[in-house]
Image: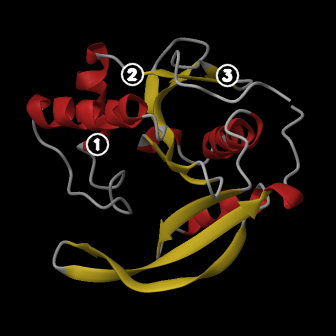
Amino acid sequence: MNRLFDFSHFPLLETDRLKLREMTPDDVTSLLKHLGNPEVVRYIDTQPIKTKQQADEWLKWMGSFFAAKDGLRWGITLKQDGVFIGSAGIHGWNREARFAEIGYDLAQPYWGYGYATEVARQLTDFGFDRMMLNRIEADVVSGNEASMRVLEKIGFKHEGVLRERVYKGGQYYDSHLFALLRKDYQPNNS
């Protein structure tokens, strides 16, 4: 088992095909393109962004988790060429109760290739191995069937529906709570 993560440095995570790395100001243009796509933000509690200033604000917000020492948000890049394809994070680290929440978003051209599963497994491994979590949660907006399948594939259980929890575009949406407990966790051996 690894030493408890202490925020002394921003960790680089890798899968077979991806790198999860700290985001930098160089990512603002990629974030604008990524989060400006209405399909990418369809199930995220935000509207598409339209300006570099908004992308810069997102970048600062994502970095605030690390600064507050309660989570991390990585940029996802392809190992082969370094292309930015999304972001992923683990947030809301409750050290006493030992739980946190994961989330991820991918650029539309990269949907359906198993990248989200790789990312979710890597986040889960990090949460259990480095943050010593007992429970990892994920909150999925109704309709996001692909994300629900990813979570179920790596062992998360559907625990319930939080009715009309998300308000976006003048409409309420239900949210589905998924969780994986340490005792049910199967480490990623790939």
Estimate how packed mark 2 is, as few (under 14), some (14 to 19) or many (20 or more) residues with alpha carbons within 10 Å: many
**Above/below status of 126 relative to 160:** above
Q: Quadrant of residue 64?
A: top left
Residue situated in front as seen by the camera: 53 or 68? 68
Q: Residue at x 12, y 42 (%)?
A: 50
Helix, strand or loop for disc 1: helix
Q: Is residue 99 left or right of residue 125?
A: left
Residue 23 disc label:
2
Helix, strand or loop for disc 2: loop
Figure quadrant of the N terminus = top right
Residue 14 disc label:
3
Q: Is residue 68 left or right of residue 31?
A: right
Q: CA distance from mark 2 to mark 3?
A: 15 Å
Residue situated in front as seen by the camera: 48 or 39? 48
**Above/below status of 154 relative to 171:** above
| Residues under numbered marks 2 and 3 in contact, where contact means CB atoms less than 8 Å apart | no
Instruction: Tell me which amino acid carries mark 1.
Output: Leu
Residue situated in front as seen by the camera: 162 or 37? 162
- Residue lying furthest bottom: 163
Which mark is nearer the camera, 1 or 3? 3
- Name the residue carrying label 1: 35
Q: Is residue 152 left or right of residue 52?
A: right
Q: CA distance from mark 2 to mark 1?
A: 14 Å
Q: Residue at x 68, y 59 (%)?
A: 151
Q: Of callouts 1 and 3, which one flags the residue occurring earlier in the amino acid sequence?
A: 3
**Above/below status of 67 relative to 9:** below
Q: Residue at x 90, y 34 (%)?
A: 189
